[in-house]
Amino acid sequence: SYELTQPPSMSVSPGQTARITCSGDALPKQFVHWYQQKPGQAPVMVIYKDIERPSGIPDRISGSSAGTTVTLTINGVQAEDEADYFCQSADSSGSYKVFGGGTRLTVL
Amino acid sequence: QVQLVQSRAEGKKPGSSVKVSCQASGVNFKNVGFSWVRQAPGQGLEWMGGIIPVFRTINYAQKFQGRVTITADEITSSVYLEVGSLKSDDSAVYYCAKEDFDLIGTQPLYHGMDVWGQGTTVTVSS
């Protein structure tokens, strides 16, 4: 079955930049969406279609894409950004969706 | 304002089935899809399947084929997830999520899961 690969964890100091990657063979053909999840809460979409930001999401959060890897970038990390981040895409047919394993971002 | 409200927590015995509901408000059922996603304790998100009500298109993750049924009722603006032959490792929080899409020919191009329900905890224990 199709898989998306993310680093399990990452730590950054406040004010630094966090870059979370997501890799998958079908990513050149399929969009990636990113979700932030804090403990005990439902996920929240922070980036869709690789680079688009939903309303209400701060512009220090951005997405980029290059071949089989997409990246979620958080500039000027704040304590409130501490959360789990999941990428989501679909297989080459587009019909079957998949999530990455998630990356726990810790703000030191 | 779009909102998805899910049914309350369930406790089930192994081998039984559970049906979780998700009622949408502020949503036009004619141009959205819905996915069901679950999260076991301390684990990541797992896509189970999805439905586009207007096209009656349903897709299931291979892992759940034959054990999961997703349905929609446009009259009540609700989508449902039924999981059969429950096992202890089906204990999880189950989420519904709305997805907008564009049609490219006959294929939907999804915009991501932009609205989520609050989650329904299902506990399977003897």
Image: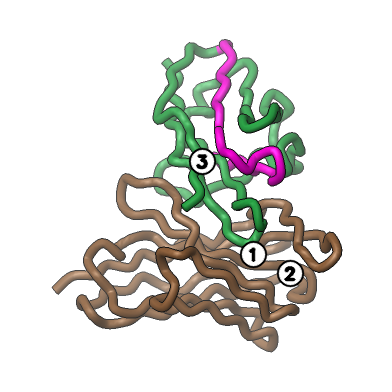
Chain colours: A green, B brown
Marks 1 & 3, CB-CB < 8 Å contact: no
Which amino acid type corresponds to the residue marked 3 in the rendered image? Leu
Task: Sort mark 1 into few (<14), some (14-19) or many (20+) by Cα contacts within 10 Å.
Answer: some
What residue sits 41% from the left and 72% below the top?
B8
CA separation in Å, label 3 and label 2: 32 Å
Ranked by sequence position, the earlier of labels 1 and 2 is: 1
Identify the residue position indicated by label 2 in the image: B26
How far across and how far down the image is residue A7, in percent?
44, 28
What residue sits 74% from the left and 38% below the top?
A53
What residue sits 65% from the left and 42% below the top?
A32
Secondary structure type for disc 1: strand
Marks 1 & 2, CB-CB < 8 Å contact: yes
Identify the residue position indicated by label 3 in the image: A4
How far across and how far down the image is residue B59, in percent?
58, 70
- Bounds of the magenta span? A15-36
Name of the residue lying farthest toward the bottom: B75
